[in-house]
Image: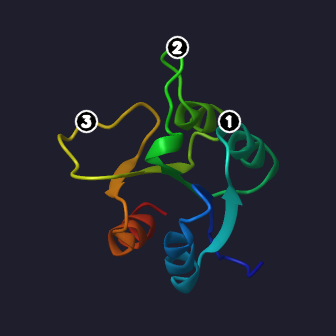
Amino acid sequence: MTPGRKTVLLLADRRQSHTQQSLRAAGYHIMLSFTPDHTVALCVNHDIDAVVLDQEHFVVTEDWSVAQSVKMIKPRICVFLMVRGKIVGDDLPSGIDAIISEGNTQALVARLQQLL
């Protein structure tokens, strides 16, 4: 890995290759995870700068989410939630730093640059 290059962990459906390609093209090192448990394990064992969660993987169980678990392990990590459809309201779920519309990789890259 190149020194100073930021690492983004992408928790998404395998079909999210467009997001992965866009982040790579923007210069980010990409790690992939396909389950919330694997995401948390990767955050424990690797130097991750940001996590991008696909909406379908953002499941709240007993008022707890994968985003909160990641923040508990590494409070400074940036967590993004990619949602389908329109973003309604300004309230962010617990553990989420920013919400981005799915497919809007330009906005994702811009927010990553802003928050990292």
Q: What's the CA distance linking mark 2 and mark 3? A: 19 Å
Identify the secondary structure beneath mark 1.
helix
The residue at the far top in this view is 62
- Give the x, y percent position of residue 102: 37, 60
Identified at 73% across, 57% down, the residue is: 47
Q: Disc 2 marks which amino acid?
A: Glu
Horizontal arrangement in the rendering, residue 29 relative to residue 18 (left or right): right
Colour mode? rainbow
Estimate the x, y position of residue 1 in percent, counting from the top left: 78, 78
The tag earlier along the polypeptide, 2 or 3, is 2
Residue position for label 3:
91
Q: Residues within 10 Å of mark 3 (few under 14, many from 20)?
A: few
Which residue is depicted at the point 56% across and 46% down?
76
Mark 1 burial class by Cα count in 10 Å: few <14, some 14-19, many 20+: few
Q: Is 48 situated above or below 76?
A: below
Residue placed under numbered mark 2 in the picture:
62
> x, y (%) of residue 18?
50, 75
Is 62 located above or below residue 44 in the figure?
above
Task: Answer with left or right where residue 83 lies relative to residue 57.
Answer: left
